[in-house]
Image: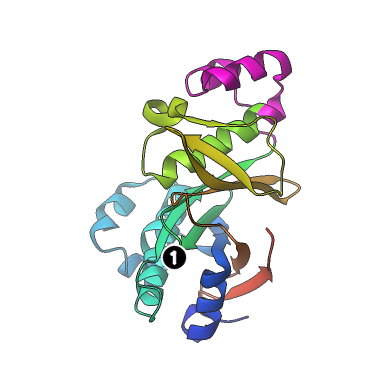
Amino acid sequence: MKKPSELSNDEVLTGLRAGTVLVWAEPRDFPADHRLWIERLGEERSNFDAASNPARKSELLFSRSAVPHLYRQWKTISGLESLTFNIAHTKDRFVAAFSIAGSVGVDLERVDRDVNVATLERIASPSELEWLSAHSNAWERLKLWCLKEAAVKSHRGGMWIDGASWSTHLPITLGKTWVVQRNGTSFPALADLVDSDWILTLVCASSSASLGSISFFRWIDADGIWQLKSQNRI
């Protein structure tokens, strides 16, 4: 186990040159009274103070303090000048994706979430709607929603505005390099289970790049200790 400041340049570069680095945490890892990350909130401090939900406060500490701090630290390393990151969160878990291969989008959802048909009809392409009309079930709807969310976020768009402009081949296979398309251009994608309870999706905004291998770090306590959980896969 190592703190971010103890990760050598070579370790960071190896993970990012090989593909995508993921960092995840739980709300308990960022208690709402954690002084260090509160002090580093900067302009986000007012939003933090206005939040009444402890889970929301924890999410702000992760997404607006800890992850940007790590991003600024890693971006000073030679070879990481093009570093980008994206964040996804639920009430139970947070995740950040880092990449030097171009803008990246990430989404994370519990596998028992039910995305209803009416919601998907607003963001599905005609070919997806045709397939779903014959094969729709809660699991297929969730996979499509998650992949669309990551795709939209990779281009910093909005789901309700841009979702229908993205398309993919259905059914989506987990753990396999996938493709999403927009305006005739293909972009690399991946959908996989983090464990039995969570599905995670990634999309890279560079059509010529690859998500590559996945280095997965876990933030295991409020002191900022990280642990490499797995490599070359989620």
Residue type marked 1: Ile
Depicted 151 relative to depicted 228: above or below: above
Q: Position of residue 38 (x, y in %)?
A: 35, 65
Residue occupying image coordinates x 52% and y 35% = 148
Along the viewing direction, whichever of 11 and 204 lies nearer the viewer: 204
- Chief SS of the magenta region: helix
SS for callout 1:
loop
Please say whether residue 129 is one of the residues in the magenta stretch: yes
Please say whether residue 147 is one of the residues in the magenta stretch: no
Residue occupying image coordinates x 71% and y 44% = 174
The residue carrying pointer 1 sits among few (fewer than 14), some (14 to 19) or many (20 or more) residues within 10 Å by Cα, namely many
Depicted 47 relative to depicted 80: above or below: above
In which quarter of the view is residue 142 placed?
top right
Figure label count: 1
Q: Please state the extent of the stretch shown in magenta in the rendering.
A: 112-140
Instruction: Determine the residue located farthest toward the right in the rendered image.
Output: 196
In which quarter of the view is residue 127 placed?
top right
Q: Position of residue 151 (x, y in %)?
A: 48, 41
Q: Which image quadrant: the N terminus?
A: bottom right
Is residue 152 among the parts visible in the rendering? yes
Residue occupying image coordinates x 65% and y 41% = 110
Depicted 148 relative to depicted 210: above or below: above
Along the viewing direction, whichever of 148 and 4 lies nearer the viewer: 148
Residue occupying image coordinates x 52% and y 84% = 10
- Report the residue marked by disc 1: 100
* Colouring convention used in this rendered image of the protein: rainbow
Q: Position of residue 155 (x, y in %)?
A: 39, 44
Q: Which image quadrant: the C terminus?
A: bottom right
Is residue 91 among the parts visible in the rendering? no
Q: Position of residue 15 (x, y in %)?
A: 56, 72
Does residue 234 appear left or right of residue 168 in this picture? right
